[in-house]
Image (tube, rainbow, N blue to C red):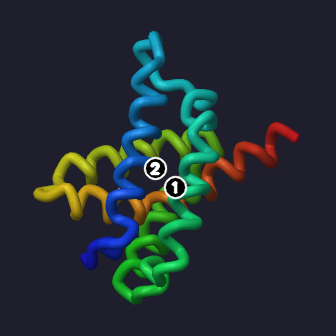
Amino acid sequence: MKYLDFSINGRVQNLMVDVFESISASKERELKISELMDTQSIFELVFEIVKDTGFYNQDEHFNLIKALNSDTSDENSEDALYTTWATMGSNLNNSKTQEEFNAKFALFVPIILKRMEAINCIEI
């Protein structure tokens, strides 16, 4: 896995912290879909920052995103978001460096956004 461009690594890391701080602010024991959905604007900002670097277009990353995206194709939208979030968490916990952590987070961003968009379409 290739890491994020040095020029954006810190920005992505700060936004990732914003996501986790937002979610950890909950007083509930279980994470709610609404809490995840409240972070959508942060995920969108990360996506905009990362996509301009070509990170998502690298063959290795593109193939990983496609594989991760198909893992939840049989689930409803909310379950798919939960599953993607849990898979991301497991992958992040296996990171050996902060740079690897940031890159793995960035890989999940388009998938999480796709799941969030599916939920937004249902709510309309």
Q: Which element is circle 1 on?
A: loop
User: In the current view of this chain or complex, which residue is farthest to the bottom?
Assistant: 59
Residue at (54%, 78%) from the top-left corner?
52
Look at mark 1 in the image and give the residue it sits on: 72
Crowding at dot 2, Cα within 10 Å, few <14 / some 14-19 / many 20+, comes out as many
The answer to whether 52 is drawn above or below residue 42 in the figure is below
Look at mark 2 in the image and give the residue it sits on: 84
Q: Is residue 45 left or right of residue 121?
A: left
* Mark 1: amino acid: Thr
Tell me the quarter of the picture where residue 103 sits. Answer: bottom left
Q: Quadrant of the N terminus?
A: bottom left
Q: CA distance from mark 2 to mark 1?
A: 8 Å
Crowding at dot 1, Cα within 10 Å, few <14 / some 14-19 / many 20+, comes out as some
Of callouts 2 and 1, the N-terminal one: 1
Q: Which element is circle 2 on?
A: helix
The answer to whether 30 is drawn above or below residue 16 in the figure is above
Residue at (46%, 12%) from the top-left corner?
28
Residue 81 picture location, percent across and down: 54, 45
Q: Are marks 2 and 1 in contact (CB under 8 Å)?
A: yes
Q: Quadrant of the C terminus?
A: top right
Residue 38 picture location, percent across and down: 62, 34
* Mark 2: amino acid: Thr
